[in-house]
Amino acid sequence: MRNSSRSPSSSRDIGAVAIQAAVLIVLGAVVWLAASNAVANLTRLGINTGFGFLWRPAGFAISQTLIPYSESSPYLAALAVAALNTVVLAGVSIAVATPVGFAIGLGRRSANGLVRGVSTGYVELLRNVPLLLQLFFWYFALLRPLPPPRQSLTLLGAVALNARGLFLPMPVADEGSGAVLAALAAGIALAALAARMLARRRERTGDAPRAAPVVLALAIGPALIAALATGLPIHWDLPHLQGFNYQGGLAVQPELVAMALALSLYSAAYIAEIVRAGLDAVPRGQIEAARALGLKPVTVNGKIVVPQALRVIVPPLGNEYLRLFRNTTLAAAIGYPDLTMVFGGTVLNQTAQAFEVMLILCAVYLAINGSVSALINWYNRRIATVQR
Amino acid sequence: MTAAETPLQPGIGARASRLLHGCISSPGNIAMTLALVLLAAYALPPLLEWTIVQGHWSGGPDACAPIDGKQRAGACWAFVGSRWTQLVYGPYPESEHWRVDTVFAMVLAAGIALLSRRVKSKGLIGLLLILVAPPVAGVLLAGGVLGLPEVPVSRWGGLMLTVTLAGAALAGSLPLGLAVALCRRSSMPVIRVLAIGYIEFLRGVPLVPLLFLVMSILPLLLPPGADLPLLPRAIVAFILFNSAGMAEVFRGGLQAIPKGQFEAARSLGLSGAMTMALVILPQAIAIVTPGLLNVAIAIVKETTVILIIGLIDFLNQIQAGLADPKWLLGDQVRDSAYLFAGLVYWAVCFGLSRVSARLELKRERRG
């Protein structure tokens, strides 16, 4: 084992060096064999090598582009579009999954037996059915049979849902919105400063004035005043029926709606379990002691339960986010143009440069995965209990 | 329930009254209770009527076909019934179905033996299942020897393909995962770094890109002319992907073994390998069994992903059936087919998760 005796002359160490050298030699031989096979295969099949293809025009259309892209754009632009599609899908899904998961996790600890039962049913149902089948359910059974645009399901005339997708109102910034944004930024900076000063004063004097209203007012007050002064420089672009489909607003393709629904509801089941475990980790005595001190239920939750539960919740929650991110790759099954489908599918078929395409694909996933997990670790270190 | 526990359990009446009290203990709870009861009253009767009362249980496509141009109400279970053979065996030749049945029986028997409380030598059964069963099942299904007619893997499909893929992925990733976990804890830096790189790469790259990677790269690495069908390539990808997950589970188990166990075994004169095999691994495997079962559940669920590369597993067989013009009869066929598929996967995964939870509980009680 690792801590066994380690004198340089011992025969064990010579044996270890020999084993490691042998492993490296065998590995090198396998790699060399595979590489020579690959070279032979590539020349036989007449496949190009090198990353030059990235600057050649892609020549295919992508059904969802958040940055300017056309068929004459290079493959590199297609990569950026597809990566952005993956990030948007993951972002939307995380934003939905987190509150749903927290609600269901709290539901599993509710005093209400009925709520408890429904929450448990949700978790056990969604965790034990393959995500792909759930995706098919949302996409083929729910969204595809929706009515055509003329018979759309509408909500308050602002939101429309039909077989072509989901149409949402989109905020459009008018003249003068720059001032509002600047005021908002200044307000947030001011609020952060005030929060810090108040915290320092509390640490020094033990005097705890109510900080939340002051900080909140400082944060949004300036922006509110600026918005009123410039005459509310934002208007909503509402989707409206024109011709055969809705125009204007924010159009979301049905594939994205189905993916986001499936991913977020599936992950919510796991997040619920994480939240439940976090709540269970707070000793009951803490809650009882806080109540005995006469704290209000809101204070017990806000100052005793949540801060302690959060320490247990955050690390697995981060892992769940990463899992959700990895699951976005199922998009290939219904044709949402994510990174894997565009790059591992279309680009690979067009260029046949498997090594280069796969290297890029894996590198992008590893990079996003790695940076998110670094972020989680950093946050986790920040909120972890300080061991004295 | 043992006699010692009985007094601690409140009676049914007390439990019911506590449950009822929980439902109406505060205005918020009353509101939630009312909302849920109303929702159930609104949704459950039509659902029951659709699935059971109006369901069409037998017959061919005619049973669910529209009458006078009007779509027929109710679930179409006839779809499942009349496509049962395809769902289970896929395009596997009918005269050879007994071979598939034999493999199913083997899996079932092993599963029951592993779950039963009375069977003692579970380690031996597990070892047989990992080392002996896959080659036997592979030979039986593929044929070509011992007078069995050959069935090419391109004719494997349906539930049989799902079970084969899941079984192969499990049997391959378990030993590989254990080996990688042991390498991860090795004192030799080269081996440790290789293991860390292997785990980090496979845990960072999602399954679908990995599947594409193996699909496109593996044929290029083989000698020119050597052709590997889709299924073995998919199995390679599944084994690689899950071995990293297994390795992390095993690592957790190995870390949980107190250092004193190593020291005691070594001071008794056991060699490093013997310490591992006789002292550490038996304890570690007992600890990680629930975790391994969770990976098994994940494998069962992720087998569905292979439809992306065009293999026809159980779920894809259902999709193929739904695309059959004979069954293009309306939404109810698809809804019932998905409901059935969901039920099948749910039953398997939920069952496994219960076993995993039971083992976990048993271990916690033992301390």
Image: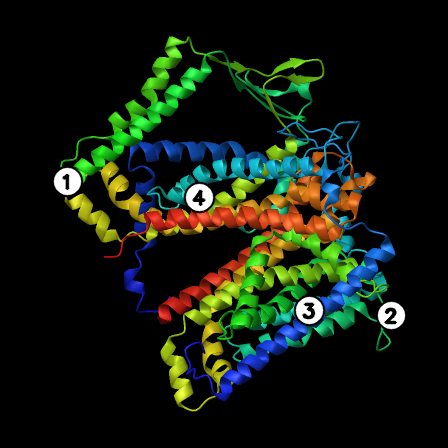
Tags 2 and 4 both on a single chain: no
The chain that hosts pointer 4 is A
Splitting the image into 4 quarters, where does residue A140 fall? Answer: top right
Q: Residue B159: x percent and y percent?
A: 71, 57
Amino acid at circle 4: Ser
Give the Cα distance between marks 1 and 3.
73 Å
* Vertical order, A235 against B22 (above or below): above
Splitting the image into 4 quarters, where does residue B221 fall? Answer: bottom right
From where the camera sits, is residue B307 visible?
no
Q: Residues within 10 Å of mark 1 (few under 14, many from 20)?
A: few
Q: Are marks 1 and 3 in contact (CB under 8 Å)?
A: no
Tags 1 and 4 both on a single chain: yes
In the picture of the structure, the residue carrying the numbered disc 1 is: A204
The chain that hosts pointer 2 is B
The chain that hosts pointer 3 is B
Q: Secondary structure at mark 4?
A: helix
Quarter of the image containing the N terminus of chain A?
A: bottom left
Amino acid at circle 2: Pro
In the picture of the structure, the residue carrying the numbered disc 2 is: B149
Tags 4 and 3 both on a single chain: no
Q: Nearer the viewer, residue A109 or B290?
A: B290
* Residue B229 located left or right of residue B251: right
Q: Secondary structure at mark 2?
A: loop
Give the Cα distance between marks 1 and 2.
85 Å
Q: Residue A251: x percent and y percent?
A: 62, 24
Tags 1 and 2 both on a single chain: no
Quarter of the image containing the C terminus of chain A?
A: bottom left
Q: Secondary structure at mark 1?
A: helix
Residue furthest out toward the bottom: B269
In the picture of the structure, the residue carrying the numbered disc 3 is: B105
Question: Which callout, 2 or 3, points at the residue further toward the start of the chain?
Answer: 3
Report the disc number at residue A119: 4
